[in-house]
């Protein structure tokens, strides 16, 4: 009995551990991106290199794992994958990295990126893929969570407040002192900070459009590794062409054994190559709502790591806005879970109505009296 209980506890802990690792990997990614930007790396070049490394890692992996079950590519699937690369990779990543540069804060951008469920709900309403059911608790929760999350985003964007000094004290014993040559950067002006925040919010809507397109592509092309590899490949081509339109000189593209190479390699190989299989496994085991519940962990990880590694200031406005965003996130997730329960409860009623209609009198025909 004890072995069975222990085995069950271990099995239950595996998805939790996997999602914590995934969120930590993505948290470290934000730090690497900020370090590369601080070193002077261009936003578009950084995104292009990240996707090159990611495509170079995922394409052979997808070929080996799914070579026997991969269906043929059609024009419709290729078009969908191209659009996934455009909205989910090229536009989304360029906006996010530019937002980090403008706000000079990984914590702000990370907190705002948790608006994805709310932005997905808004996109679904605008495209009529979903209806607003205000008479049901699920619809009320999703609408309320969206408004609360957007309110938190506005608070985080426009209100700074006093600095929280206890995390700054931790930085004196962190890695920022170990480097010795990096000094605390001045805080950006209000204009770039607000613009960067709105770019981060816009990236959430771009990501929501990608989720909508990829859901349809996944129905006709159910190969997760191949989808990730081809989307990354399309994104790499698009982002490289965008970067070449702006920077054609070799100096911007030159990589040495420095933070630019490490950041690009980590983003492409570790974040895309390791985190994606872990997240895909959790999606298959527990579903999307379970995976989304761990999203707020990245805010905590990034806030602590940014203060220690980057000497980044954390203000009360960021904390309050992040709390509202997380509260809105869980309201939307609760609404989605409740909606699934409502649909399951309504299904027997619809079947019962069909049975009643089937037992009714047959309709008259021309041959009957």
Image: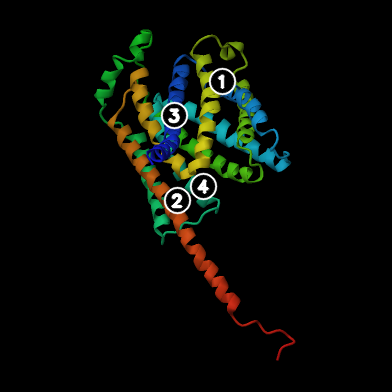
Q: Distance between the residues labelled 4 and 3?
A: 30 Å
Point out the tag, 1 or 4, that comes first from the N-terminus: 1
Point out the tag, 2 or 3, that comes first from the N-terminus: 3
Point out the tag, 1 or 2, that comes first from the N-terminus: 1
Question: Which residue is denoted by mark 2 in the rendering?
Answer: 336
Which quadrant of the rendered structure holds the C terminus? bottom right
Circle 1: element type: helix
In the image, residue 41 lies at what x, y percent?
A: 51, 16
Q: Residues within 10 Å of mark 1 (few under 14, many from 20)?
A: many
Q: Toward the viewer: 118 or 266? A: 266
Question: Which residue is denoted by mark 4 in the rendering?
Answer: 123
Left of 327 or right of it: where is 98? right
In the image, residue 286 lies at what x, y percent?
A: 48, 43
Which dot, 4 or 2, sits closer to the camera? 2
Q: Residue furthest front?
A: 1
Q: How far apart are marks 1 and 2 (CA)?
A: 38 Å
Circle 4: element type: helix
Q: Which residue lies furthest to the bottom in this view?
A: 369
Which dot, 1 or 2, sits closer to the camera? 2
In the image, residue 227 lies at what x, y percent?
A: 63, 35
Circle 3: element type: helix
Question: Which residue is denoted by mark 3 in the rendering?
Answer: 21
Point out the tag, 1 or 3, that comes first from the N-terminus: 3
């Amino acid at each position: 009995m004890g072995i069975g209980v222990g085995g069950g506890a271990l099995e239950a802990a595996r998805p939790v551990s996997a999602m914590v690792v995934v969120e930590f990997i993505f948290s470290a990614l934000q730090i690497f991106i900020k370090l590369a930007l601080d070193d002077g790396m261009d936003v578009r070049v950084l995104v292009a290199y990240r996707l090159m490394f990611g495509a170079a890692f995922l394409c052979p992996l997808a070929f080996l794992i799914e070579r026997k079950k991969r269906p043929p590519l059609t024009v419709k699937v290729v078009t969908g994958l191209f659009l996934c690369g455009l909205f989910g990779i090229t536009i989304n990543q360029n906006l996010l990295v530019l937002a980090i540069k403008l706000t000079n804060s990984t914590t702000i951008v990370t907190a705002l990126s948790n608006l994805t469920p709310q932005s997905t709900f808004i996109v679904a309403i605008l495209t009529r893929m979903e209806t607003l059911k205000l008479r049901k608790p699920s619809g009320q929760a999703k609408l309320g969570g969206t408004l609360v999350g957007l309110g938190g985003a506005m608070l985080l964007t426009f209100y700074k407040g006093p600095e929280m000094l206890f995390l700054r004290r931790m930085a004196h014993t962190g890695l920022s002192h170990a480097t010795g040559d990096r000094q605390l950067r001045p805080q950006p002006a209000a204009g770039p900070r607000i613009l960067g925040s709105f770019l981060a919010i816009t990236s959430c809507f771009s990501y929501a459009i990608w989720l909508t397109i990829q859901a349809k592509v996944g129905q006709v092309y159910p190969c997760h590794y191949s989808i990730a590899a081809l989307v990354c490949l399309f994104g790499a081509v698009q982002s490289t062409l965008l970067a070449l339109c702006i920077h054609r000189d070799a100096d911007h593209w030159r990589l040495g054994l420095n933070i630019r190479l490490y950041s690009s390699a980590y983003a492409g190989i570790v974040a895309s190559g390791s985190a994606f299989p872990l997240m895909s496994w959790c999606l298959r085991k527990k579903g999307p709502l379970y995976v989304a519940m761990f999203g707020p962990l990245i805010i905590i990880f990034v806030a602590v790591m940014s203060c220690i590694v980057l000497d980044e200031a954390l203000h009360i406005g960021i904390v309050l806005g992040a709390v509202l965003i997380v509260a809105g996130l869980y309201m939307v997730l609760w609404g989605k879970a409740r909606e699934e329960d409502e649909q399951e409860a309504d299904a027997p009623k619809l079947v019962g109505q069909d049975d009643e209609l089937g037992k009714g009198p047959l309709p008259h025909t021309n041959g009957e009296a």
